[in-house]
Each structure stands twice: as structure tokens, then as C-alpha cells.
Amino acid sequence: MPLASEGSIFQQPLIAGGKGDCVPLFQHPATAMPSEFDLIGRYFSRNSPSALLGVGDDGALVQPRADMSLVVSTDMLLEGRHFLPGTDPKRLGHKSLAVNLSDLAAMGADARWALLAIALPEANEAWVAGFAKGFFALADVYGVDLIGGDTTRGPLAISVTIMGEVPPNLALRRDAARAGDDIWLSGATGEAALGLAHIQGRVKLAAADLAQCMTRLDLPEPRLELGARLRGIARSAIDVSDGLLADLTHILQSSGVAADVYLESVPCAAALASCPDPVLARDCQLAGGDDYELLFTAPSHCRAEIDALSQELNLALTRIGSIIPGEPLVTVRDASGQPVPVAHRGFDHFG
Ligand code: ADP
Ligand code: MG
């Protein structure tokens, strides 16, 4: 959607102010810079067998399968806010899609279609090629088709809209937790935030721990298979993007319940266990964010089924607490049941 009424982003945007301070970069005959449409054609137009009509028209046409509801979600990644300047484009392509797929996982949905809106400071073809490689490698794993998007010039920003399908009565929602439910967590939280802390000079990690933390930060694995298998088992779910306690609180607020979390039950990832700063490690574990694990609640009669699912998926699923009646607050408790003070609870862009 160009700002000017006619033509493309290469023309002077209406908001440029007429001072010539906004020179179009994408299309420069002397340097044969690729155009917007070159980039779309070369890097973002692929077959989309699951759509009736994909990239290339004014809109895509999709048909959800019979008796399935469409689940739609969007997440934006801004340079300097969600990722560091200079982040490897391939990793960024992966992460842009992964964080969106994680939202589908948290709804218990099957992933189907994606739209990609991207603002680029310049038409750097090598960068776009790397980004597309990371994006499509992950899309292929989950059978997601890219069916459209928008490409424009501007400060580096990426917004993916993801669509999936779920039987409407089996969607995993935030508002369905009940007192008596167990609280479960997939994998372990904290390593992504610890990797970021290292980059920011707040801690110095050993090389192997750093590599692990950077993988967790840059290449999150959306828990789609788990989400789909939790249909009919989990009562509520959310993916952990803002921090374990913050995201649990979102479930509590939506469901109108409280929670106890047992600190010694919360899984401790290897890099956190060997972190030279245990206070920071605890903060990352409980409030770090960027984990993209699933946090879900389920009735206690489902324990054996969830343990079996953990075995089958080869993914740790750990019972970390209980839903209780009360105001929507999390109480973190030690081994003797005493409340533990918690410094940070999670991330808020405006907090
Ligand atoms: P319009 O002017 O109708 O909005 P565009 O010129 O923006 O269309 O885009 C042309 C086609 O390319 C559309 O089908 C659009 O969905 C698709 N498209 C644009 N950018 C991307 C992108 N980054 N990834 C995938 N598809 C894209
Ligand atoms: Mg457009």
C-alpha cells in the first residue's frame, strides 16, 4: 500500500515534506538496484498450494477446512526494540515467523498461511535473500504458505500475520483456567533473556552457555505440535513471550483466578544453573521473556496423559504450580510453602 496514490514506494512519499530529504533508494538505474517488485518476485513469491490464490493479486484467497475456525494473529519486530541492529537476516527471518507460529501454538491451532509486511532501509538483496531463507526454512517445516504482504522503504521493521485453523470448541484460550488446574510449562525459560543480558554486558557467560542462549534468543522453536496435541487436554494456554510470571498473570486476569508457583519445580536451564550471577539467572527464568514455550493449565486427572505426551514429543513438560481461587496474582513459593519475594515479573513495552 504505497503512501502516494499512484505508483510505488520509490516515488517520493507524500510525507517527505518536499525538501528532497527522502530520496527513493530502491530503484536506481545507475546501480541497478532491485525494485520493490523485483524483491517480491525473487524472494517472496513461491507456490502456495494451500491457498486458492497467493502472492500477486490485490488479495489472497484462502479456504479453511470444513468445521475449522480461522485463528489470526500478528506480531511486529522492530530493529532496536525486538532485535539488535546487525542481527543475521537468516535468523531474523526464522524468528519473525517463529514468534507468530508460537501464538498459533498457544491457541492449539494448525498453521496454514502467513502474510509478511516488511520495511527495509535499502534494497540490499543479500540481506533479503538471507531473510527469505530463514523464513521459508521454518515455513516449510510447518507447511505454512506465504500468501501476501507488503514491501516498503523505511526503518527496518517486520510484521507477520499468521493464520491457522482450529476446531472452534477446542481452541486453547487464556480465559478458561479453573481453580484446581495444574500449571504446566514446556521446556525451560530464561536462556534467551540471559543471552541478551550477555550482549548488553550485564553478565559474562562461558562460550558454550552463550551459544546455547543465543540459539534460544535468535532461533526459537514454536511448540506447534504440542499446542495441537493439547486440544481437549489443556484448559487454557499462552506462549511465554513477556516472561513466565507476566504471561501466567495474563491467564489469571482473563480467567479470574490466582496461582501458586513452586519455585523448586520451575525447570532451570543449564546456562542458568551455571550462570555466575544467580540473581540475574532467577530474574531471567521468571521474568525474562522471549522464550516461546507454552504455559498451560489442565485438570489434575490429565497428569498421566501429559507425561505420556512429553515422552512422545521428547519435550519436557513440567508441573510448576496450581490455579487457586482469588485475585489474579501469582504467589511464588519455596519448598516449605513460604512466599518468595520476586523483583521482576516480566516485560512491558510501556512499563
Ligand atoms: P497492492 O499495491 O495491491 O497493495 P503490492 O504492490 O503491495 O500490492 O504487492 C503486490 C503483491 O505482492 C501482492 O499480492 C502482495 O500481497 C505481495 N507482496 C508484497 N510484498 C510482499 C512480501 N514482503 N511478501 C509476500 N508477498 C508480498
Ligand atoms: Mg500492498
Image: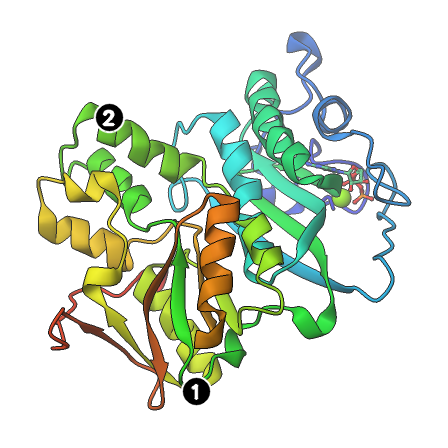
Ligand 1 within 8 Å of the CB at mark 2: no
Displayed quadrant of residue 273: top left
Front-most of 331 and 118? 331
Q: Secondary structure at mark 1?
A: loop
Q: Residue furthest bottom?
A: 326
> The disc labelled 2 sits on which kind of residue?
Ala
Q: Can you give x and y, in whole percent of width and height, for residue 17 in the image?
A: 58, 44
Mark-to-mark CA distance, 1 and 2: 42 Å
Q: Quadrant of the C terminus?
A: bottom left
Rendered view: 336 above or below 10:
below
Q: Position of residue 251 (x, y in %)?
A: 44, 74
Please count the marks in the image.
2
* Crowd tier of the residue under label 1, counting other residues whose Cα lies within 10 Å: few below 14, some 14–19, many 20 or above: many
Residue 205 vs 171, above or below: the answer is above
On residue 316, the disc is: none
Q: Pointer 1 and pointer 2: residues touching (CB < 8 Å)?
A: no
Examine the rendered structure and indicate whether residue 295 appears above or below residue 9: below
Callout 2: 10 Å neighbours few (<14), some, many (20+)?
few
What residue is disc 1 on? 256
Q: Give percent across and percent down for residue 134.
A: 57, 28
Which amino acid, by three-letter code, is at mark 1?
Gly
Q: Check mark 1 vs ligand 1: CB closer than 8 Å? yes or no.
A: no
Comparing 167 with 318, the one in front is 318
The answer to whether residue 173 is left or right of residue 346 is: right
Closest to the observer, 32 or 329: 329
Q: Indicate the secondary structure of the residue bearing disc 2.
A: helix
Residue receiving disc 2 = 208
Closer to the N terminus: mark 1 or mark 2? 2
Q: Can you see residue 63?
A: yes
